[in-house]
DNA sequence: GCGACAATACTCGGATATTTCCTGTCCGAGTGTCCATGG
DNA sequence: CCATGGACACTCGGACAGGAAATATCCGAGTATTGTCGC
């Protein structure tokens, strides 16, 4: 199982949007150029983030994307689920109730051991992601990189070094 | 991201093989009929488990699959990685080094925050699966179901109820 | 009755089509900005 | 000089092809059994 690369794009882009000064929207064009990504395809994932209530989109010139909530209230899990879907990675097909060795339904009041184990693992995974906020992600960006990003987002000449 | 259903098959089948008395091999035909699965496709996953050193295969009549090691030494993680591959779910593409906002390589001595967060989640997930052995899975099967399985595996008439 | 041999039935293993989902792309709808024009 | 109207450029949003991976299937290679034949 490999998960969609859109997750990486969504996390980076959300973190970049979070670095924009208040009131400044970041267009998908800027995002795609900043990370060297195909603009049209990136748009698809950004739309998913809007539908999930992570970002808000503004049309027209000077438009673009903004955080729908403070960066401390958006978790990495939300971003992932917005793009990958909320369905658990493991979906029990109840094969124990099929075939010649089928277990009668009255003995299946509890989920089978396999699904329990997988559900716990899924829980651990999601729990780990839920404990990280976008603010944490931004904090992990080196300070001078953050400064350069801020300059680029405001439209000022990069200056760089 | 949904993970292959072959994982569920592999876990159930390995647990069933573990319920067979010592020296008794379980054929893929019995496994496929027991769970109502397509035999040829199930074979593909069983082969993967053999390659990974989880099961051993014996050809010929009375042949089939056996555990390669005691059930207490085989973890659920091994079975999953045998089928899904050992590659981590999240693979950092280093998009921070691409595009107009590329971070110079000398500033990338450490992995980016996104990949760190995803790696920790992956670690939590795998750790949860590594803490469960096949013996644990068998122990979660109801006792009377286990008894019936044992009878079926030895070729005796089901008896059932 | 016993041993050797051959035919047989059963097993696993790799190579081959089909379907599904992710990836990638395009064009249309809507909105704020900017400029030209008239007062 | 100021207000107004219109054209424009830029934005997002949903609908449309291409490709890789999972799904499903078939046929061939090898082995222990089993029955038969000869001694």
Image (cartoon, coloured by chain):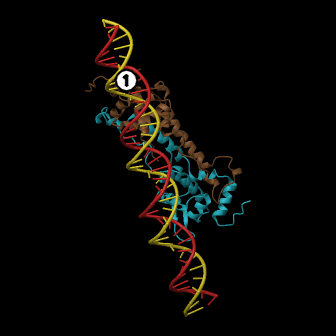
Chain colours: A cyan, B brown, C yellow, D red
Residue B106 shown left or right of residue C39 in the figure: right
> Can residue A116 be seen by looking at this rendering?
no
At 69% from the left and 66% from the top, the residue drawn is A157
Q: Would residue A90 appear left or right of A140 to someone viewing this image?
A: left
A82 above or below A117?
below
**B35 left or right of B96?**
left
Residue A147: where, in percent of width, then height?
A: 68, 58
The image position of residue B141, as x and y in percent, is 37, 30
Residue C5 drawn above or below residue B48:
above
Could you say which is closer to the camera, residue B109 or residue A121? B109
Which residue does the image show at 38% across and 31% down from the upper left? B28
A53 and B100: which is toward the camera: B100
Q: In the rendered image, which residue does mark 1 sit on? A: B62
Tell me the subunit letter for badge 1: B
The C terminus of chain B lies in quadrant: top left
Residue toward you, A135 or A58? A58
Q: Could you classify mark 1 by the number of other residues whose Cα lies within 10 Å: few (under 14), some (14-19), or many (20 or more)? A: few
Q: Residue at x 68, y 49 (%)?
A: B108
Question: Number of numbered discs present?
Answer: 1
């Amino acid at each position: 199982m490999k998960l969609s690369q859109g997750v990486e794009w969504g996390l980076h882009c959300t973190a970049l949007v979070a670095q924009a000064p208040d009131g400044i929207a970041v267009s998908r064009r800027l995002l795609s150029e900043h990370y060297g990504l195909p603009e049209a395809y990136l748009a698809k994932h950004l739309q998913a983030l809007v539908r999930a209530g992570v970002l808000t989109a503004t049309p027209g010139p000077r438009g673009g994307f903004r955080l729908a909530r403070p960066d401390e209230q958006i978790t990495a899990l939300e971003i992932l689920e917005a793009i990958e879907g909320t369905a658990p990675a493991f979906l029990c097909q109840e094969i124990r109730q099929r075939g010649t060795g089928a277990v009668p339904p009255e003995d299946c009041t509890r989920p089978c051991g396999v699904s329990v184990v997988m559900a716990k693992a899924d829980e651990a995974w999601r729990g780990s992601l839920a404990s990280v906020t976008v603010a944490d992600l931004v904090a992990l960006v080196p300070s001078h990189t953050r400064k350069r990003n801020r300059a680029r987002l405001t439209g000022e000449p990069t200056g760089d070094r």
